Amino acid sequence: MNIKITGLIILGCVISVAAYTQSSGAQSSGEGAYYYDSSGQVVSGMPATAAVITVGQRQTGVSTILSASVVPYREVTFTAEVPGRVEYIAGREGDRFNQQEVLVAIGTEKLLARRGQVVANLNNANLALQNSQMQYGREMWSPKSRDVNKMPGMGMPSMFDQMFTRNVASGLGYGNPFLERYSDLYSSGTQMGQAQGLHLAALSKLREIDASLRDTRTVSPFNGVIVEKMVEAGDTVQPGQPLLKYADLANLQLSVEVPSRLIHVMEQGMVVPAMLDFNHQYVDVRLAQIYPVGNSQRHTITVKFDLPIGISAWPGTYAEIMLPDSGETSETLVEIPESAVVRRGSLPVVYVIKGDRRELRLVRLGASYAAGRVTVLAGLKAGEQLLVNPPAGVTSGWHKQPAGIDTY
């Protein structure tokens, strides 16, 4: 009987040693150390990305969070310059175009008819100018006042009048041949000047018509996208009526209304953090422009910040920007990786490692000042040990198996 009991004890020890050896081998060859819950049951293996870190701090000044809007770097609104019917629209909202491409075309029938009339008037004015120039030259070299054909008589009487009568009459004060010639010359010059004015007016009218013809074509001033279309092909438009909005979406900015008390701490080129609302993405933006005049109603000043090129953002969406407030003192904030935060419903929690135990702790998160990191306002202290990338299903309990304990 004693022999049987002794044999059973030895057999039990062998089985226990084999099970412990198998468990140790699986643990050493698996994904890492095992996690246990409060009852001692294995939950899951710790992945290679999981790690234990020490909670750090960030020294930062107090920031003021302001609302902002994503706006295009350049945006223009095209309006009709001439009345007419819209004959062509290049595309719809979202279509991209290169520089100097035709976006909208308005009918030119009336303008072409007017141009034909102006060309005819220009030809008439050109002929009148040539005739006045010819008459002026004739008066210059062959004055009317000395024309023999206008003298009375013929033959010897005409010659007698040309040689004696005019000269004697001029000497006695009856007529002045020089003044008569000057008057005729001035009259011819006046007629030539008037003809030049009519020619210039007709030429200017032609240029005006040509400019109006060019205004019937709306051309893209830069590479961009149609963001809003106000008319369709076939609509009748009048001068000043909006046609479409066109914007450069390759370069985006943030437009912020900044209180006047924060302007003195801002300078050209400074970099501040911002958060885009539609994807909760934190980026660094650079101050590009401070408007010289403030808003008299809201008592704010418009400031624009450049977003990084290639950032995924939509014009018109909401954003937040964090500006330093020089009126407040700096503060020290606890900062942890975002991968250490676990969402339990709407409450963020973290796993704090204390010795061989794993503690579930509720925290209150603050703003993010760096990519992949978030500040903690309450629930953690600097220097505590924190579990990063906790596996799914992990709860509070033993973090690792204490030495000398085989079962829980």
Image: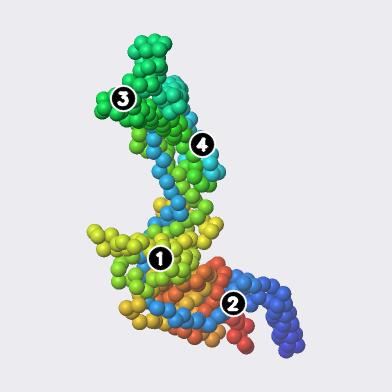
Q: Amino acid at mark 3?
A: Val
Distance CA(mark 3)–CA(mark 4): 78 Å
Distance CA(mark 3)–CA(mark 1): 101 Å
Mark 4 / mark 1, whichever is N-terminal: 4
Is 102 drawn above or below residue 308 in the view shown? above
Q: Residue under label 1, please give it.
A: 321
Q: Amino acid at mark 2?
A: Ala
- Circles 3, 1 touching at the beta carbon (< 8 Å): no
Q: Residue at x 40, y 78 (%)?
A: 61
Q: Amino acid at mark 4?
A: Val
The percent position of residue 255, horizontal first and vertical second, equals 39, 59
Distance CA(mark 2)–CA(mark 4): 59 Å
Is 254 drawn above or below residue 91 in the view shown? below
Distance CA(mark 4)–CA(mark 1): 38 Å
Q: Which mark is residue 102?
A: 4
Can see residue 205? Answer: no
- Classed neighbour count for the residue bearing mark 4: other residues with Cα under 10 Å, few (<14), some (14–19), many (≥20): some
Q: Relative to the observer, which residue lies in front, 70 or 237?
A: 237
Mark 2 / mark 1, whichever is N-terminal: 2
Q: Residue under label 3, please give it.
A: 168
Q: Which mark is residue 51?
A: 2
Q: Secondary structure at mark 2?
A: strand
- Circles 2, 1 touching at the beta carbon (< 8 Å): no
Of labels 2 and 1, the one closer to you: 1
